[in-house]
Amino acid sequence: MAESNKELYRQFIDRVLNGRDLSAVPQYVAPEFVDHRYPNQDGIAGTRKFLSYVHQAFPDVHFKAEDIIAENDCVAVRFSIVGTHKGEFQGIEPTGRQVRWSGINIARFANGKIVELWGEADMLGLMRQLRGE
């Protein structure tokens, strides 16, 4: 189970996050999905809304799984992200800056789909880059 969940998470990164195929979200995310990171991002529609927002703000965004560790029904991913700020993000108008940030997510799987997600990312570092600090 743990190995198959790791592979599903890798596919989600490749196809949905980096491939920008939001139509594939239901293949990886359960309808009852709960995102513990952000309010109002639950379910398939919430996931699509959030990812669309990220893809609009950073059209060339690229997610890289630095480490993937799985046990039982959970998969932990230490990730890095790079992208160019070409759309509004968190109230900051496009700067054209290429930014990098990192974080860790933990996804819980059930029946081959992500049902819960917890995570922390270096949003302070990202915001400082966007502000040119």
Image (cartoon, grey):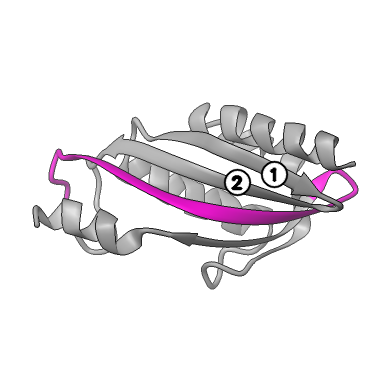
As helix, strand or loop, the secondary structure at mark 2 comes to strand
**Residue 16 locus on image (x, y percent):** 58, 34
Magenta region includes residue 112 = yes
* Picture residue at 75% right of the left edge, 31% below the top: 7
Q: Residues within 10 Å of mark 1 (few under 14, many from 20)?
A: some
Q: Which residue is mark 2?
A: 77
Question: Which residue sits at x=55%, y=61%?
Answer: 119
- Rendered location of residue 26, percent (x, y): 73, 43
Residue 91 x, y percent position in the rendering: 23, 64
Left/right placement of residue 39 relative to residue 122 reads: right
Type of amino acid under label 1: Ile
Pick out the residue farthest to the left.
Answer: 132
* Structural crowding at the residue carrying mark 2, measured as other residues with C-alpha within 10 Å and reported as few (<14), some (14–19) or many (≥20): many
**Position of residue 53 measured from the top left corner of the image (x, y, whole percent):** 41, 50
Which is more N-terminal, label 2 or label 1?
Answer: 1
Q: Nearer the viewer, residue 60 or 4?
A: 4
Label drawn at residue 69:
1
Residue 2 on the magenta segment: no
Q: Are marks 1 and 2 in contact (CB under 8 Å)?
A: yes
Near-viewer residue (51 or 73): 73
Q: Which mark is residue 52?
A: none
Asked which quadrant contains residue 12, the reply is: top right
Give, as a single range, the part of the protein colored magenta.
Answer: 93-113
Compared to residue 105, the image places residue 98 above or below, namely above
